[in-house]
Each structure stands twice: as structure tokens, then as C-alpha cells.
Image (cartoon, rainbow, N blue to C red):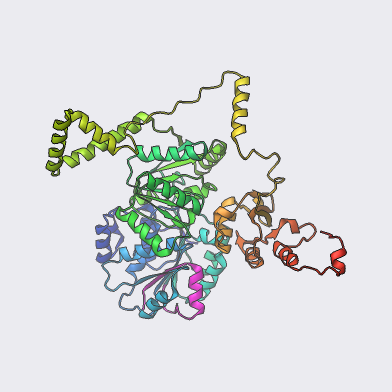
Amino acid sequence: MTQDAFTTETGLFSDLHLNPKLLNALEALNYVKPTPIQAQIIPHLITGCDVVGQAQTGTGKTASFALPLLQNLNPQDKRKPQILVLAPTRELAIQVSESFSTYGQYIPGLKVLPIYGGQNYSSQLQQLRRGVHIVVGTPGRIMDHIRRNTLDLSALNSVVLDEADEMLKMGFIDDVTWILEQTPSQKQIALFSATMPPSIRKIARKHLVNPVEITVESTSSTGENIEQSCLITKGRDGKKEALIRILEAENFDGILIFARTKAETIELTEYLCEKEFRCGALNGDIPQEQRLRIVDQLKTGKLDIVVATDVAARGLDVDRISHVINYDSPHDTEAYIHRIGRTGRAGRTGKAILFLAPREKRLLKNIERQTGCSIRLAQLPTAKAITQRRVEAFKEKLTAALGEDCSWYETLLHDYCQEYDIAPEKAAAALASLMHQKKPLLMKEEPKQQPVRNKKEARDRVASIQSKDDSPRKQGSTRSRKPEPGMERFRIEVGFDHGVTPGNIVGAIANEADIDSEFIGRISIFGDYSTVDLPYGMPNNTLKILQKARIYNRMMQMKRENQLHGDLPSPQDRKKRARRKPSKNSSSARRPSTH
């Protein structure tokens, strides 16, 4: 592969030879200076070169390919798509399509179509018949349209593979290869990936012609413009209290809160709404139209907080997001990087706060080691600080109200004070107290538990805590623990030797079998295999799907662990046998069971 010829970064977008319509769009967005990846990649794509770009999320890579491809577009011809962008998730597909529309807002008649699963086929077919210039989609739905002959790629001149490593992890790499084989032989390809595993390099060697390789180095995988901190929280109530204190103490514009399960997003959203925060939830169970509406409300300021799962938030790019809070800890370092990449994007500043239980401190060290970034251990805002913020907010409301016509209320209070011989200050204090009955301005600090003074006191305290614990810890290693009630254990033929992480396993199962991550139980990873606990009674057709699913291009070959030794019947087979009631005279009724 050729080396990068444009080694000097340009100072302004106007230096990159973009046409006036694109420069006008950038000026409307207040974009003046390109990011490093934009400065290096835009000149190559304008000249028609194939490009391999390696950069972390949040570096501005969407503009680095959208601007030059829009420059080379023929807006008069929309009969067949000229540009195809493949993205791993529908959220990213929507975000990329919106970026194309925004950057091309002054190009007359520009048509951009996002195509993804979960959306009505009829609307996609209708727009394809009318003609579009650019198609941005997920591999599965793009394949469906190609096979239905509803998407004609014969006029393509450019293909973009965005977040190629994510498509690899989600098992789409074979689909991507198939789609590329359906495109014209003469075309420009731009491949973007945060990492470059062998499978991605193989695609580059096979399908790209003398590509320019551009790697944007950063001192930290998580970005210098993100202030990172960590809070050690204890228990469910402790996490909620910590969250409320942070929301009250921090000056924020928009906040994205990450929860691990869909149920948690709903529960936490309802809790925050009860606390009078403007909040919405994003997860895979929420209909697409509602999800788009929630994102739009976050963008326009109708919502200040969104609680989301990892999958639902992927590709979310909202300028207002000033804070990312990891309410539930991420599965691994890579998930953490993607989460906090929703803030501090393309030169903006942001804050990232990580909640960890005391037993999860090892995760903090892993993140610091792998990102090369130090994460500050923070303390909860004090009750005094919260009280001060509440008082300041109250005074601001009071000052704003004094600017309005309050004459009727003034007369009412004057008459009340005269009638009951009450000082005006006392009446005003009583009104303030009524206003803040649900959340008093004065926050009292809970008394701290005194430190233990000797071993006997320590043992007594531990015994007291354990007596309140409804689910005492089970002894033994993870390998020997039995699945929880209602769960059964499965074995998959991918392990540490193949570089797999719990996040990879959860992602593969959730995406391939449409199983909510909250129903995925304990995961144990060993050398060449792993085990995972899933709901008891999984249908055989779902199991077959998971057997063929891939992680890091290896088939999972999932099997029930209890069938590995003795070929025991599946739960479905046992249910069928239970329904067969033998007659009283049959020999099988007299024969003792062998199971």
C-alpha cells in the first residue's frame, strides 16, 4: 500500500479545494478548521484514490469521506445510486445519512436514503423507485434489496465501509464481502476502522486498488478533550443517590447515561422523571419512530437526558451531549471507549463519569492501562454543595418571576398578612417551603459509618451485613457454579485464545438471536472455549442460528453443556415426552424410568 502523500495538515477547509456549496454548508455549521483525519483524507478521496483510514471514534471521519464524495457527485443523475455506505448499526446509518444531507444542504435535489432493518420496506422501495444519489445502510437490509432486485448498484462510483471492525465483530464480514462482489469493478473504496485485524486487512488487499493508508495517532484512545472521572458506588440505592447528586451539581447541556439492560433504561428514566428531570429512554424494544423522536428532542433541547443501552446509542452524534455517565459499568475497555466517544467529538470538550462497585476496581485499572489515560477518582458532591446549587437555582427562578406581572399575587399576600397579622417575610418563607415540599432546598448529609476499631467489631459488622443479604455468596469457582434458576448453560467454541471478550459474546447473541442482553447470564471465558447462561428452554431453531453465528470469524458452535456428556434430551424433547401419557396396561408404564 502506498504511503500518505499529504503529510502537511492544511489550516482551513477552504484550503482543501472543496466547492463553494460545501464550504457554505460548513460555514453554516461554524466548521472552519478540519480535524487531522479530515485534512489528510479529503484530498485523496477528491482525486479518486482508494483509502484505508484508521482512527478512533469521534475524530470527524464522517466528514472526511462525505465531503469529497459529495464533491465528486453528479446531482443531475439520481436514477441509480452513485454512493453506497455500509454501517454496522441502524443508528450509525441514520447518523451518516443525516451528515450527508447536512453537508449537501446547498446541492439542489440531493437525495440520501438510509436503509436498515426494522424499517418498513414499502417506504424504502418507494424512495428507491423515485431515485436517490446516496444509500447508507446496514449489510443485512442492503443484501435483501440486492437479492430482490430493488437496489441497482450498477452505477456506483464510490463505496464506504464505516467501522469495519465493528461489522467484523457483529458477524457481518461475509455479508460485506458478498455486497462488494455485487458492485462494479471500477469504483472507489474508502475503508474506515478503529483497529485493523487480519480479516479487515484481507478485505483491503482483495478489493482496494493501491490504497493510501492513513492512521491518525492520538495520545489517548479516549481523547484528550474528555475529562474522565470515576465514582465508587455501593448498591442500587447508592448508585441512584450518586446519580442525582451529580445531575444536581454539574453544569450540563445534554447527558447520555448508559445502562446495561433495556429494563434498566426504562426504570432509570422513570426514576429521573419523578425527580423532575427531562429524560427519555433508548433501547432496542422502542419503536424506530419513537427512537428518532427522542434523539430529535435531545438535539432540540426538549430533553436533557437520555438513558440508553450500548447498541441503541451506537452512532449517536448530538452536539448537546456534554456528559456521558456510565451508570452500569461497560463489559470491556472497547465498550467504554465507544460510550464516552459520544461526547468530546470533533474538537468539542466533554466529561465522562464512570460508576464502579468496589469489586470492579480491576476494570478501572484495565481501562487506564489499555487507553494510557489516567482516570481521576472523584468524590460525591457534598450536601452543602448541593444545597448551594439548589438555592442559586431558586434565586434565579425568583428573579425571573419578579420580571413578570405579579400585582394580583402581591395584593393577595398583602391582604393575607393584614388579615392574619403575619410579617411578609414569614409569608414568603411559607410559600417557598410549599414550593419545595418534594425536594427541600436544604439537603442534609447522611451520617457516615464510623470506622472499625478492632477485629471483633469488624467481624460483627460483616455478620450484620451478611444477615441482611437475601442472596449469600456461593462458594467455588465460576466453572463449578450452577446456573441460576430458570437458566441453563451453553458452551461456545471461542475463548481467550481467540481474543474474545464478554462484550463480543453478548453482542453476537443479542444481534443474531434477538435476545435481550438482560436475559444473558453469567459468562465464563476459558482458553479455547467459553460458557454462557441463557434462559431455560431455548427453541432449537434459535440454537441453530447461534451455532452458525460468528465471533472474530469463528463459528460459535453453541451447544447445551448438559448434552456434551451423555447426549441428554433438550427441554423441548422432555416436554414432548411428558405430554405422552402411557396407558395403564402398557409395558412402558410398568418399566422404571432410566433418566
Give 42 or 253, whichever is nearer the viewer: 253
Q: Position of residue 487 (x, y in %)?
A: 65, 53
Q: Position of residue 458 (x, y in %)?
A: 60, 23
- Left or right, 147 with respect to 428, comes to right
Q: Judge left or right: residue 339 versus residue 576.
A: left
The residue most toward the front is: 419
Q: Quadrant of the C terminus?
A: bottom right
> Is residue 585 on the magenta stretch?
no
**Res. 400 image quadrant:** top left
Write the residue at 40% across / 60% down: 291
Tell me if residue 138 is in the magenta stretch. yes
Along the line of sight, the residue nearer the viewer: 207 or 511: 511
Q: Residue at x 52, y 42 (%)?
A: 367
Expressed as whole percent of the image width and height from the top left, the position of residue 267 reads: 46, 49
Q: Which residues are magenta?
A: 131-157
Task: Count every numbered label the image shows and give the total.
Answer: 0
Q: Is residue 144 above or below residue 438?
A: below
166 relative to 545 in the view: left or right: left
Q: Is residue 320 above or below residue 120?
A: above
Can see residue 323? Answer: no
Q: Nearer the viewer, residue 175 or 216?
A: 175
Q: Quadrant of residue 467?
A: top right
**What's the residue at 26%, 72% (across, down)?**
108
Q: Is residue 45 visible?
A: yes
- Residue 450 in picture, x, y percent from top left: 51, 22
